[in-house]
Amino acid sequence: MENEEKIFIKNFGEKLKKLRLEKNLSQEMLANDANIPINQIGRIERAEISTSLTTIYKITKALDIKITVLFDF
């Protein structure tokens, strides 16, 4: 993975964590609301994985935000 991609994934994870905390949700609560594996939220937030569009869609629905908000970093 190129450096720019790593930075993008890191920024995405940080934005997700910020939004999750603003909603007072634990990683487990968000994962349950989004119907995704519990450890996946942490892996995304720590930039350990690049996630799918389907997962991003589920997360934005669980956070009740527009998808563009998640990419505003």
Image: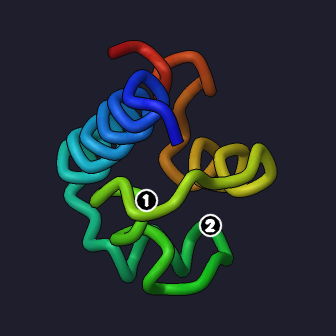
Q: Is residue 1 left or right of residue 18?
A: right
Measured as percent of width and height from the top left, residue 16 is found at: 36, 44
Q: Kindly identify the residue that appears in the image at 26 percent across and 49 percent down.
A: 17
Measured as percent of width and height from the top left, residue 50 is found at: 57, 52
Q: What amino acid is found at the position of numbered circle 2 in the picture? A: Ala
Q: Which residue is mark 2?
A: 34
Measured as percent of width and height from the top left, residue 40 is found at: 50, 75
Coloring applied to the structure: rainbow
Q: Nearer the viewer, residue 10 or 55?
A: 10
Provide the secondary structure element on which disc 2 rests.
helix
Q: Residue furthest front?
A: 2
Q: Nearer the viewer, residue 51 or 30?
A: 51
Q: Is residue 31 above or below residue 65?
A: below
Can you tell which mark lies on residue 44?
1
Q: Is residue 6 left or right of residue 14?
A: right
Q: What amino acid is found at the position of numbered circle 1 in the picture? A: Ile
Provide the secondary structure element on which disc 1 rests.
helix
Q: Kindly identify the residue that appears in the image at 54 percent across and 40 percent down.
A: 64
Q: Is residue 69 above or below residue 32?
A: above
